[in-house]
Image (spheres, rainbow, N blue to C red):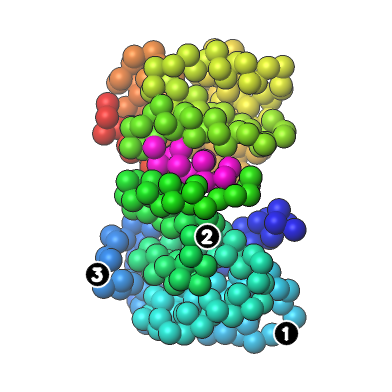
Amino acid sequence: MRLTLVRAAGALAVLLTAQVEALAQRNAVDSWDPSVREFNSSSGTSAIPAETRNATLDGLNKILSTSKLSAVDRTLYLGIRAYQLSRVGREADSQKDIAEMGKVLPSDWQVVMALTLPALAGGGDRAAALRTLDNALQRKPGDPSLLVAQSQVYMQLADFQRALGLLDTAMASATAPGDRQRVSYNRGLANFNLGNYAQAADDFDATLAGRTNFKAKQWPLLWRYAAQIRAKRDARATLARDVGGESLNEWPGPIARFLLGKSPVGELEVAAESDEAAKRSNGKCPAAFFIGVDAVRRGDKQKAREQFQLAQARCPTVSELNWAAASELKRL
């Protein structure tokens, strides 16, 4: 049930986020880019014109007026409306939607919100996302899913120290293996960006526990490699041990093959542009980042800077690779 919920909520959140932002762009009086607006924690104001905000809420109201929505879908749309209501200062109504989420999907409403809010924050108003998550945590204090979501929004803001504190709190309350995996992975990201490379490597190692297939292990393995390189550990030997005889043909396998010295950089760059899975997931973004990591391993700071700058240009601002590239550039 939890895996199905994650897939459904994640897909719907991405879809609706795209719809909302497309609507905003069509109706906006002035051109605006929600992904680069400065965070304003004091006012929480939004650059979206009032008519666009109202249209978005009208659309959500129409969707929620139907009786045909599944429990997961209704919970998802309630969470998005709670966020939109917070954006326009209707906090009491936002809190009512959060309460309704708990009635519709009692066991997993918080998971739906945790999957949805960071994506909405990245395309809109991060202050509103944080307020909505604060309200959710008042109803379910210490919930690891909600704390992870808050940490992700703070990492979008490059406040990695605050994110780390939230993740430490989340780890203390996480009892389910899946929750501990998610907390460890995100804590690894926070530690990496703070330059706590040894701790980051240990966090990524911890998140590998319980992953039963190689596909699920690949990204944690790559992140652990990056952290171990920066911690001056033997990252190649560890990666080679854990890859073993697995095929590295399926993306992001070509990144691991390159890092292990089994293929040249040109082959990775071709794969990032031609592999179907890589094209669907913007493979040129992680390719640039990990080519930069390899340059750090070799002591080529100029190449590392060039690749991390390229990663910043290729990776969206909500991407963990964008954050890491920015953090690494500050330390080179």
Cα separation between marks 1 and 3:
38 Å
Residue type at mark 2 is Asp
What mark, if any, has residue 42 been given in the picture? 3
For disc 1, the marked residue is 67
- Is 283 left or right of 151, judged from the image as shown? right
- Is 124 left or right of 224, judged from the image as shown? left
Task: Examine the residues drawn in magenta and state their main secondary structure.
Answer: helix
- Is 186 left or right of 194, judged from the image as shown? right
* Mark with earlier residue (1, 2): 1
Eye-nearest disc, 2 or 3: 2
What residue range appears in magenta? 179-191
Tell me the residue at 52%/33% (across/down): 204
In the displayed structure, 326 sits above or below 154; it is above
Image quadrant where one finds the N terminus: bottom right
Q: Position of residue 189 (x, y in %)?
A: 44, 39
Q: Secondary structure at mark 2?
A: loop
Q: Position of residue 79 (x, y in %)?
A: 54, 72
Q: Is residue 185 highlighted in magenta?
A: yes
Q: Position of residue 168 (x, y in %)?
A: 43, 47
Residue type at mark 3 is Ser
For disc 2, the marked residue is 143
Q: Secondary structure at mark 1?
A: loop
Residue type at mark 1 is Ser
Eye-nearest disc, 1 or 3: 3
Structural crowding at the residue carrying mark 1, measured as other residues with C-alpha within 10 Å and reported as few (<14), some (14–19) or many (≥20): few
Residue 156 visible in the current orientation: no
